[in-house]
Image: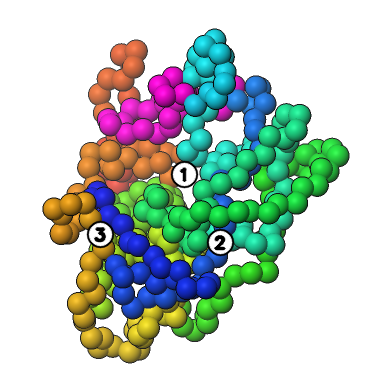
Amino acid sequence: MYPSAAKAIWDFEGIFCTSRHIPGVKFAGLIHPGILGCAPSAEVLATWNQREGELIAANRLEDRDVALPPNPTNVHAGTADAELKAKIGKEGARTIPGRPEHGGNCDIKNLSRGSKVYLPVHVDGAKFSVGDLHFSQGDGEISFCGAIEMAGVITINFKVIPNGVADLGLKSPIYIPGPVEPQFSPGRTIYFEGFSVDHNGKQHYMDVNVAYREACLRAIEYLRRFGYNDYQSYLLLGCAPIQGHVAGIVDIPNACVTLSLQDELFDFDILPAAFPHEKKDRGNCAFETGVTMGRVVDGTGKNSEFSFGGGMTYKQGGEVGGGKKEEESVAEKTANLVLGSSVV
């Protein structure tokens, strides 16, 4: 919906930050690494490539990447010889997603100072890596590179737990957050609800991604009344310490999520009780040269007709691979159920 390149520059003042591009906002950072994990073994790496390859092969959507396979182009292989470099390009996993076997790029904002993380070790020496430091980030980092990125130094203490993977049943990392976290008053926080019904009114099945996007859109729409444009609000939700929660994932067809927006982020009252609010000129975020406002795309595109929630996709009619007749479409099945229920 917000395809234009945009940014906000943040200035640090002790533990707080402000931005000339999103005026009227000030908050304390919760510094954390976006990436943290141990290296996979050859067996774990093969598992990643197999299961993600199967997902890619099963994808029927046009122009949508559902996972990214190993890429031999521009391989970062250090001092490896040509043979090893070719092997890395053919088998090396992309580090975009986090994965259950080792953690990785999970962007967990509460994994901050004083936290403890329990990670599976798959190779001698663990080959631990950490990086992608954020001064602050909202849950979900919704604008992709939406956190406030920063340089820094991390001090980490390590302890090896013999047989820890087996004793803890560690199929994915466990963490205990530290005692350092910005505090906000519950009574000064607005929660926006989102459901598996997209902004065009299309029903999806238990799709948490759709629900969270809709909750974010409700917050963006709410902030318009104060003078913020959509791109300013979009960037703010990506980097301020907003909280996203899954409220319900058992009541078909809708998952329900909530997104919090703290009144104390702003130097004016945003609570509904303070209406009517004064709408002011809040300036603008930064765009590429010659661009004064980012594009807003209301349509969702052909691929958004499909839902991935609950492991179900909307099926298209007609022939599929191997010439087999595909199952009836969701619309056809719904119509048949409705017609069938009306017969006495």
Q: For label 1, count other residues whose C-alpha is less than 10 Å away and answer few (under 14), some (14-19) or many (20+).
A: some
SS of the residue under disc 2: loop
Answer above or below: position of 128 versus 285: above
Q: Quadrant of residue 172?
A: top right
The image shows residue 94 at horizontal and vertical percentages of: 49, 31
Q: Within the magenta stretch, is there residue 6?
A: no
| Residue 94 shows up from this direction | yes
Which label belongs to residue 253? none
Name the residue type under label 1: Gly
Label 2 with label 3: CB-CB less than 8 Å: no
Which circle's residue, 3 or 1, is located before the other in the chain?
A: 3
Q: Quadrant of residue 11?
A: bottom left
SS of the residue under disc 1: helix
Q: Residue at x 73, y 29 (%)?
A: 123
The image shows residue 168 at horizontal and vertical percentages of: 79, 45
Residue sitting at the far top: 83
Q: For label 2, count other residues whose C-alpha is less than 10 Å away and answer few (under 14), some (14-19) or many (20+).
A: many
Q: Tell me: 133 left or right of 255.
A: right
Which circle's residue, 2 or 3, is located before the other in the chain?
A: 2
Name the residue type under label 2: Ile
Asked whether 327 or 255 is in front, the reply is 255
Mark 1 lies on residue:
310
The mark lying in front, picked from 3 and 1, is 3
Q: Tell me: 221 left or right of 85.
A: left
The image shows residue 316 at horizontal and vertical percentages of: 28, 31
Q: Tell me: 86 left or right of 117.
A: left
**Rounded to the nearest whole Å, what is the CA distance between mark 2 and mark 3?**
24 Å
SS of the residue under disc 3: strand
Mark 2 lies on residue:
31
In the image, the segment drawn in magenta is 46-75
Mark 3 lies on residue:
286
Q: Residue at x 23, y 86 (%)?
A: 278
